[in-house]
Image (tube, rainbow, N blue to C red):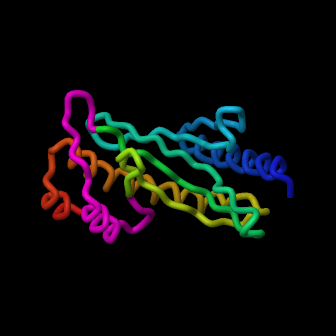
């Protein structure tokens, strides 16, 4: 299958997933392939806590056609927001992420090369079959549940509102 055909198929699948989310009142934005975006992706905004902090979940297919003939990998990726202006942000030690990920039932947390915290999950599904609507909704529900439950704690720690011991006790 050509790269162009693969990208078109991915865009069709992401359009279907956007429509699936629209049906339940979760509105997203589909970004097609362009000069700025080599892969199509779907973005959804999510309230992270009751303080108005927002996270954005990006869903995109990880290129895998060359190594897996029958499987697609749909990545769910969300950046945990910065601590905010005027707040000295505490870096998150690797030991805290290790403890957090041992307790995380779905996906995992980490930091990128710039120290930005994230939550990630990769969902494997059949390449040539449209995504199952019910299974997708269960996956998005689990991902958002983990992101809000644990992501809000990470943000509170980064803002100095929780100590490492308090965070570990709360999870």
For residue 119: magenta?
no
Residue 26 in percent (x, y) is at 53, 41
Q: Is residue 151 left or right of residue 18?
A: left
**Image quadrant in which the C terminus is located:** bottom left
Region rendered in magenta? 83-109
- Residue 104 versus residue 27: which sits nearer the camera? 104
Compared with 87, 24 (above or below) is below
Residue 167 in percent (x, y) is at 19, 58
Q: Is residue 94 left or right of residue 54?
A: left
**Image quadrant in which the N terminus is located:** bottom right
For residue 103: magenta?
yes
Give the residue at x 39% y 44%. Answer: 114
Give the residue at x 27% y 51%. Answer: 154
Give the residue at x 15% y 45%. Answer: 161
Compared with 16, 98 (above or below) is below
- Residue 8 versus residue 16: which sits nearer the camera? 8
């Amino acid at each position: 299958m050509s790269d162009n055909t693969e990208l078109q198929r991915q865009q069709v699948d992401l359009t279907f997933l956007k429509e699936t989310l629209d049906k339940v009142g979760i509105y997203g934005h589909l970004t097609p392939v362009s000069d700025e975006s080599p892969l199509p992706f779907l973005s959804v905004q999510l309230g992270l806590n009751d303080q108005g902090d927002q996270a954005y979940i990006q869903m995109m297919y990880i290129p895998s056609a060359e190594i897996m003939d029958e499987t697609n990998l749909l990545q769910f990726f969300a950046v945990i927001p910065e601590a905010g202006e005027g707040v000295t942000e505490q870096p998150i030690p690797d030991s805290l992420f290790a403890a957090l990920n041992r307790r995380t039932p779905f996906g995992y947390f980490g930091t990128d090369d710039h120290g930005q915290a994230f939550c990630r999950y990769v969902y494997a599904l059949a390449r040539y079959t449209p995504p199952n609507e019910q299974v997708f909704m269960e996956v998005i529900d689990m991902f958002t549940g983990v992101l809000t439950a644990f992501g809000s704690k990470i943000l509170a720690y980064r803002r100095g509102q929780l100590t490492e011991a308090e965070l570990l006790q709360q999870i």
